[in-house]
């Protein structure tokens, strides 16, 4: 946990330039709130300080990520999404903390957030001393790497603030070099339109054809820039049971997951961050991964079962995948 004031002027200029350059793609919510994202006192009037927290999420016992990525018939899911939806877990913890503060200081007013409102989480966490912004744009810490969630309490108390850490990326560019789609176009600058996390989670329509082969078997998010980061050699696994692996999603078969009907998807992924993309997008993503998978009759047969799916988006990606399997 760390505490910071509300001055995000430097981060605001970078955000406005990023938006002006159109690097946010279809993330319209990044622009529609204006300066509320970079001025906490506009989002929650009366805010004087922000309590920023982080919480490890890397589950113990997950299959080695690189091995899953290398096995093209398996499905890679970003490690933050293997367990229960972090929004619910962190929000509950933060609400309990806010209640304890109010019990000590009845005049305290505030709101809790965790990736749930226009909040510049990394900028606030960096100012509060929880780490520094890495070249991949994620928060980094020398002792914990980057495998953690962030959350905040906007509060009206003039608490003493903490000091920011020094940056320790040095000349390293591993995260930039490893990105499958070259979405990190410069240090600290991400083109969301090329990012696999954006393409598989935020983008609701068709994935650009030229980017589909680069996605590989990543069906929900991408961790490559974290996996290659030297500081993550010091990362610790979570002790939070809610983040434990569910339904074998750390090493599942693409064909098996592609066979889930909507009811099974909703039942098994209820309470998961993955649930919000919906079954249609789930099938779209897996179709692309099956197209990229090693050529096999089993993969083609699985894809053919969805050729007449009600969704035009699913049909489009299935057709592309079958063609790629047949090349």
Image: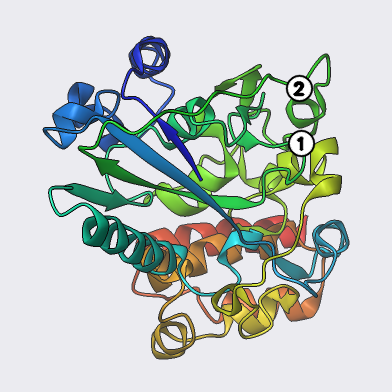
Q: Does 117 sit left or right of 79 as displayed?
A: left
- The answer to whether mark 2 and mark 1 are in CB contact below 8 A is yes
* Above or below for 196 versus 139: below
Residue 229, visible in the rendered structure: no
Q: Nearer the viewer, residue 141 or 183?
A: 141
* Above or below for 149 versus 195: below
- Quarter containing the C terminus: bottom right
Q: Residue furthest front?
A: 104
Measured from the top left, where is residue 203 in percent x and y?
A: 41, 47
Q: Which residue position is annotated with label 1?
A: 142
- Residue 168 is marked as 2
Q: Does 205 sit left or right of 61 as displayed?
A: left
Measured from the top left, where is residue 304 in percent x and y?
A: 59, 77
Q: Secondary structure at mark 2?
A: loop
Q: Earlier in the sequence, mark 2 or mark 1?
A: 1
Residue at x 76%, y 58% (from the top left corner): 236
Name the colour scheme: rainbow
Residue at x 74%, y 63% (from the top left corner): 237
Residue at x 79%, y 46% (from the top left corner): 227
**Dot 2: within a 10 Å radius of its alpha carbon, few (fewer than 14), some, or many (20 or more) residues?**
some
- Residue 85 is marked as none
Q: CA distance from mark 2 to mark 1?
A: 8 Å
Residue at x 34%, y 34% (from the top left corner): 159
């Amino acid at each position: 946990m760390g505490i910071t004031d509300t001055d995000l002027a430097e981060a605001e200029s970078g955000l406005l330039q990023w938006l002006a350059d159109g690097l946010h793609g279809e993330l319209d919510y990044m622009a529609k709130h204006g300066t509320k994202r970079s001025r906490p006192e506009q989002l929650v009037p009366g805010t004087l300080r922000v309590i920023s927290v982080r919480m490890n999420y890397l589950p113990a016992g997950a299959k080695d990520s690189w091995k899953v990525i290398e096995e093209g018939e398996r499905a890679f899911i970003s490690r933050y999404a293997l367990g229960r939806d972090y929004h619910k877990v962190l929000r509950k913890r933060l609400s309990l903390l806010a209640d304890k503060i109010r019990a000590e200081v009845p005049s305290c007013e505030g709101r809790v957030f965790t990736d749930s409102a226009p909040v510049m989480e990394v900028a606030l966490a960096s100012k509060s001393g929880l780490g520094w912004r890495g070249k991949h744009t994620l928060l980094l810490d020398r002792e914990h790497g980057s495998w953690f969630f962030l959350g905040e309490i906007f509060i009206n108390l003039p608490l003493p603030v903490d000091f920011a850490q020094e940056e320790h990326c040095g000349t390293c560019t591993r995260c930039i070099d490893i990105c499958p789609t070259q979405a990190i176009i410069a240090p600290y600058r991400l083109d969301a339109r090329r990012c696999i996390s954006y393409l598989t989670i935020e983008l609701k329509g068709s994935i650009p054809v030229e980017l589909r082969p680069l996605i590989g078997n990543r069906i929900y998010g991408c961790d490559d820039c974290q996996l290659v980061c030297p500081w993550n050699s010091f990362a610790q696994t979570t002790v939070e049971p809610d983040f434990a692996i569910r339904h074998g999603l750390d090493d599942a078969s693409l064909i098996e997951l592609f066979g889930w009907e909507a009811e099974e998807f909703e039942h098994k992924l209820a309470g998961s961050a993955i649930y919000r993309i919906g079954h249609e997008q789930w099938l779209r993503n897996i179709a692309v991964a099956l197209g990229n998978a090693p050529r096999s009759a089993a993969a083609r047969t699985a894809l053919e079962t969805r050729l007449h799916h009600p969704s035009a988006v699913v049909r489009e990606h299935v057709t592309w995948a079958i063609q790629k399997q047949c090349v």
